[in-house]
Image: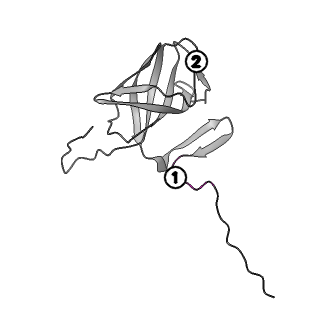
Amino acid sequence: GKVLLGKKSKLLPTKYLKANVTILQHPSSIRLGYEPVLHIGMARQSARVMSMHDAQSGDLIETLRAGDTAQVLFRWAHRPEIIEAGSALIFRENLVKGIGSITWVGDADKVITKTQPGARKTSGKESKTRSKPVKKEKE
């Protein structure tokens, strides 16, 4: 959708958001890569789970089950959205239901996600193959 903002507004569309999320109902477990539809104010769009951390200890967790609470990093699937920190979040998909509140919104340049224990992945647009300069030998 479209948003009208004043000239002095500091809100910008962002691709990433973090939220404290509580899973109300789920038949199995939620893992990295799960993509529910998020409802935040007037925004409704699917978003992928990029990382999950325990709400109290901050430890990286791999699965969420019904009744669990975690700090979850989401990436919008299609387009950036204008979201304010502190907004309420609801997500649902078939039998899955969860609620939460937004704690952070930001840019891809500042996000580092852990996809597996010990593995680091920076989000953003980076080349997968980096070319090295070719040195010419003198004959």
The answer to whether 58 appears left or right of 99 in the picture is: right
Answer with the quarter of the image where residue 102 lies.
top left
Q: Reply above or below: 71 against 29.
A: below
Q: Is residue 91 magenta?
A: no
User: Which residue ends up furthest to the bottom in the rendered image?
Assistant: 139
**What is the x, y in percent for residue 87?**
33, 29
Q: Residue at x 46, y 23 (%)?
A: 21
Q: Nearer the viewer, residue 49 or 73?
A: 49
**What is the x, y in percent for residue 36?**
46, 25
Residue matched to label 1: 125
Q: Where residue 13 is drawn, which disc sits there?
A: none
**What is the x, y in percent for residue 132?**
68, 67
Q: Which class describes the residues within 10 Å of circle 2: few (<14), some (14-19), or many (20+)? A: some
Residue matched to label 2: 29
- The local secondary structure at tag 2 comes to loop
Q: Which class describes the residues within 10 Å of circle 1: few (<14), some (14-19), or many (20+)? A: few
Q: Earlier in the sequence, mark 1 or mark 2?
A: 2
Using the numbered discs, state the Cα–Cα distance from disc 1 to disc 2 in whole angstroms.
30 Å
Q: Residue at x 57, y 26 (%)?
A: 57
The answer to whether 22 appears left or right of 52 in the picture is: left
The answer to the question of whether label 1 and label 2 lie on touching residues, with beta carbons closer than 8 A, is: no
Q: Main secondary structure of the magenta part?
A: loop
Q: Reply above or below: 47 against 22.
A: below
- The local secondary structure at tag 1 comes to loop
Residue type at numbered disc 2:
Ser
Q: Is residue 126 magenta?
A: yes
Tell me the quarter of the image containing the C terminus.
bottom right
Q: Nearer the viewer, residue 57 or 63?
A: 63
Q: Which residues are magenta?
A: 123-128
Tell me the quarter of the image containing the N terminus.
top left
User: Which residue ends up furthest to the left in the rendered image?
Assistant: 6
Residue type at numbered disc 1:
Lys
